[in-house]
Amino acid sequence: MIHNQPADHPEHGGSSSAPRPHHECANRYFTSSGDWTTRLARVGACKPPVVVPDLTGDSQPVAASVLNAAGLTLGQVTTVTDYTCNNIGTVKGQNPGAGSQVAAGTAVTVTIGQMPPPPFQCP
């Protein structure tokens, strides 16, 4: 009987508290003879994670271009009233956040600031 355990399983010296990277391509197997063996398995492209860029202050077209260059895609775009008037027509928030490590091709959602309704006026 073969029991599949991830390569970072604590029973063979790994750490179970550390998050597993999305690009892990090796698993260790406990064979019927009682030995741990490592088998490399190519799952998809096994690409390393991509760091999400900071899109704050970018227009929607610029954000899409920056994400594309990083190997990511622009996901859902929502708007929110920006009473600070600092991000009118630009990215005010994003998910996943800047600096996060994600799989290549992940969609990043952005929130674009819009003008507050009258009588409020931006300087």
Image (spheres, rainbow, N blue to C red):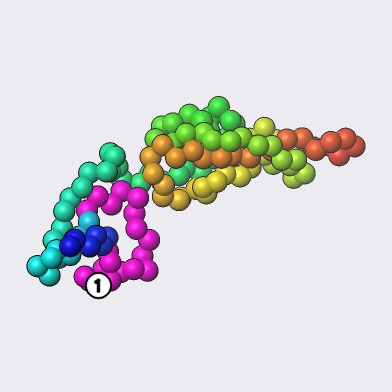
Q: Position of residue 57 (x, y in %)?
A: 60, 38
Closest to the observer, 88 or 81? 81
Mark 1 is on which residue type?
A: Glu
Where disc 1 sits, the SS reads helix
Question: Disc 1 marks which residue?
Answer: 11
Q: Position of residue 111 (x, y in %)?
A: 63, 40
- The residue positioned farthest toward the front in the image shown: 1
Closest to the observer, 64 or 14? 14
- The residue positioned farthest toward the top in the image shown: 61
Closest to the observer, 56 or 106? 106
Q: Main secondary structure of the magenta part?
A: loop
Instruction: Tell me what residue is drawn at x 71 percent, y 40 percent.
Output: 80
Dividing the picture into quadrants, the one containing residue 83 is top right
Instruction: Tell me what residue is drawn at x 55 percent, y 46 percent.
Output: 95
Dividing the picture into quadrants, the one containing residue 1 is bottom left
Magenta part of the chain = 8-26
Residue 75 visible, this orientation: yes
Residue 35 visible, this orientation: no
Instruction: Tell me what residue is drawn at x 51 percent, y 44 percent.
Output: 54
Q: Position of residue 46 (x, y in %)?
A: 28, 43
